[in-house]
Image: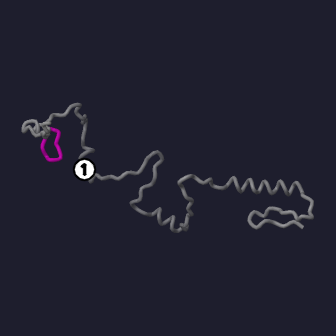
Amino acid sequence: MSTLTTNYKLIKPDVTDTVDINNFNSNFDTIDNNLFNKVDKVEGKVLSSNDYTNEEKQAVGTIVNKVDKVVGKVLSTNDYTNEEKQKLNSLVNYSHPETHLASMIVFSDGETLQEKFDNNTLFTPVEVPVV
């Protein structure tokens, strides 16, 4: 007498049974359907479970300052203050100059390029040993 497998309830004929081709095909259809719905493993990724209840999902949806994902966009930090953002938004018809005056370029020591030219501090001399 045939039995059924534990998980997919496939028909397992007994050694004394005649194999029924319909049962054989039914087993293959069950296996095919279950394999088709499996998730393929992706290298470097792990599977996770969704442990949220419906109530928790709804609670997440009520978070006031959350940012929803927009297709084609990536999230980034906004390091501007509101004041800086307003200042940038107020620029009208600004075009960045193609060249910069030496007095516009400021080094980390606070000295401008023009001051370095004037004070002869742009380059630090290097002593070359005499051989």
Displayed quadrant of residue 20: bottom right
Q: Is residue 27 left or right of residue 67?
A: right
Q: Amino acid at mark 1?
A: Glu
Q: Residue furthest left?
A: 119
Q: Position of residue 76 (x, y in %)?
A: 37, 51
Q: Is residue 25 left or right of residue 71?
A: right
**Residue drawn at x 26%, y 45% as measured from the top left:** 88
Instruction: Please determine whether, in this image, residue 105 is positioned above or below residue 25.
Output: above
Residue marked by disc 1: 84
Report helix, strand or loop for mark 1. helix
Of 56 and 123, nearer the camera is: 123
Which color mode does the image show? Answer: one colour
Of 104 and 112, nearer the camera is: 112
Q: Position of residue 9 (x, y in %)?
A: 78, 64
Q: Position of residue 129 (x, y in %)?
A: 14, 39
Q: Tell me if mark 1 has few (under 14), some (14-19) or many (20+) residues whose alpha carbon lies within 10 angstroms of its own.
A: few
- Residue 106 within the magenta-colored segment of the rendering: yes
Bounds of the magenta segment: 103-112
Answer whether residue 97 is visible to the viewer in this image.
Answer: yes
Instruction: Please determine whether, in this image, residue 37 is positioned above or below residue 124.
Output: below
**Residue drawn at x 42%, y 48% as measured from the top left:** 74
Of 30 and 94, nearer the camera is: 30
Q: Main secondary structure of the magenta part?
A: loop
